[in-house]
Amino acid sequence: MKSINIKKLYVLHSWVGLVTGILLFVIAFTGAVSVFGRPELKIWANNDIRTPAQLTPIQIETLVDKYAQQVPENYLHMVQVALPGVRSAAELYIRFEDHKEGTVPQQPAVAIQFKIHPHTLELIERKEGELRSLFENYDMDMADFLVGFHADLHMGRPWGLLTTGVLGLTLMLSIITGFVVHRKVLKQMFTFRTKKTKTLLLNDGHKVMGIWGMLFHGVIAFTGAFLGLALVILVPAAAFVSFEGDQDKLLQTFNTMPDPVLTHVHQPTHLAKALTHAQNYQQGAYVTNINVLGYGDENAMLYFNLLEAEQMHPLRMQYQGNNGEFLDAYGQFGKIEGVSGKILDLMGPLHFGNFGGIIVKVFWAILGLSTALLPITGLMLWLERGVNAANPKYSRNTYLRFNRLILGSCGGLVVACALLFPVQLMLNYVWIDAAPNPIIMGSFFGSWALLTLIAMVWKNSAKLTTIMVNLTALLLVTVLPLDALLSGSHPFNMADTQHYISTGVNLTLFGLAPLLLWGHWRWSTVGKLNQSQPDVAPQQQGEQT
């Protein structure tokens, strides 16, 4: 490739990093944490499901039948059951939906939802209203907040999804241009000079993370762009091209839970028999939620979403409702002809790493952190070269102000995420009657904004970095003793309480604190023993990130 084209790509690579680098860090870092959002952090944040709920198929069938008798018949069109502690539900939810068949098409679906305690099976709450409002208006916990923030920055649809989707595209552009620009990069796959200077360490780290993680970064970027843009752009575009703009017709084509032809002849729906079969379909598999179409009708159909170790994507199990007989098992898009269905089924699992158990999740989280560090190391390299250049393109103060912006926005985000853990414990055991949503959002965005503002006016960035690292470590290390004090749950009574997952989260946070402190100490000592070497670039005094 000609030198002039390489220079143009380098300029493009630099500007993409400058414009989107901080936002890419925000999305990637929260994504690395969100890998454990469901169900690990969900279980940790809700005391009622720290001990696994022992719900039997007979109990679930009895509860569905009990509450089905309390709703009008038109609400039996679809019955959804979300099981507690397996994905995003902290309680047992049974929702009866009326999709307004035969009425005005624009009229929204309505539902009656029953919220049930996972252990006592007592009714906690009954809600009725538009289906969309039931999903949007709920009390969130820190797991819900982080997963939602990663998905759409809590900006909602369409702008939030559009933003994260476009950021996925910019990450892909950065990966491609970065690889082309650094033509000799493959020769430096094993070059990592940790004892030289910060500039060399940043340079090597940026390239090593880019090379070794290139496939992962590309997968995350592509799947993230797809998940963000699918509903906002891709579905309307496909409907316009192939279905004359009819999005409902497009969705019906891709629907793998078609409505059965109801006879309106009553016959019991054998939910327990089908659920027992699904739970024993494969060792280690578990059902996350249940869909019943035409409950109580002789043509009722049952669908179970099943997560299992041998499949990269969830399985959809189909059963005949009137006898509980197994009919079929396939992916969410498994009935779409060709390879497109298989590809669509892999989008979510490849992005979130929710296949193959906890080992894959840990691996995904570590690689996700490298994705977050990739744009930040690039920005820091740009700052280092700008400050130390003989003829810098911008003034020194401009570089230093941008340096402080990176420190405040990125470092502040890390502190804000760590703060959510003690805040959640206080909500669970101290501020019991407080509304969780404003407290969680206020503590997160408030601390993030405050630290960003402090960083912009604090002249000694190196000292502020140390303060932020120490504060993050302090927040992480206090979670375990604070949880033990407030809930009585700790590693020594884990066998009695069966709080295996929540205790594992506490121990992980406790172990991350010294690791973070060691990493900061190691970074601060880089280059100190090599100051006399000729390849050492002058370091910024008091402005190191």
Image (spheres, rainbow, N blue to C red):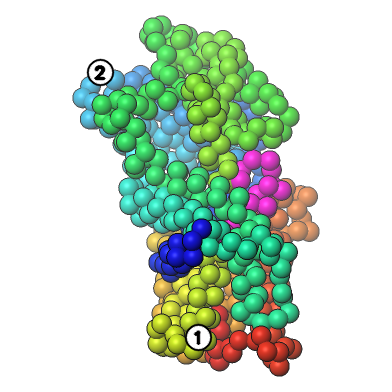
Local crowd size for mark 1, using a 10 Å CA cut-off: few (<14), some (14–19), many (≥20): few
Q: Position of residue 163 (x, y in %)?
A: 38, 54
Q: Where is 362 relative to 414, above or below? A: above
- Secondary structure beneath disc 2? loop
309 in the magenta segment: no
Local crowd size for mark 2, using a 10 Å CA cut-off: few (<14), some (14–19), many (≥20): few
* Residue at the outermost left position: 104
- Secondary structure beneath disc 1? loop
Please tell me which of labels 2 and 1 falls first in the chain.
2
Residue 456 visible at all:
no
Q: Position of residue 122 (x, y in %)?
A: 52, 37
Quarter of the figure with the C terminus: bottom right
356 in the magenta segment: yes
**In the picture, residue 508 is in which quadrant?**
bottom right
Tell me the tag on residue 102: 2
Q: Main secondary structure of the magenta part?
A: helix
Residue at 55% x, 89% y is: 540
Q: Which residues are magenta?
A: 353-372
Residue at 76% x, 55% y is: 493
Residue type of the residue flagged with mark 1: Ala
Residue at 73% x, 79% y is: 195
Q: Position of residue 343 (x, y in %)?
A: 53, 33
Q: In the rendered image, which residue does mark 1 sit on?
A: 389
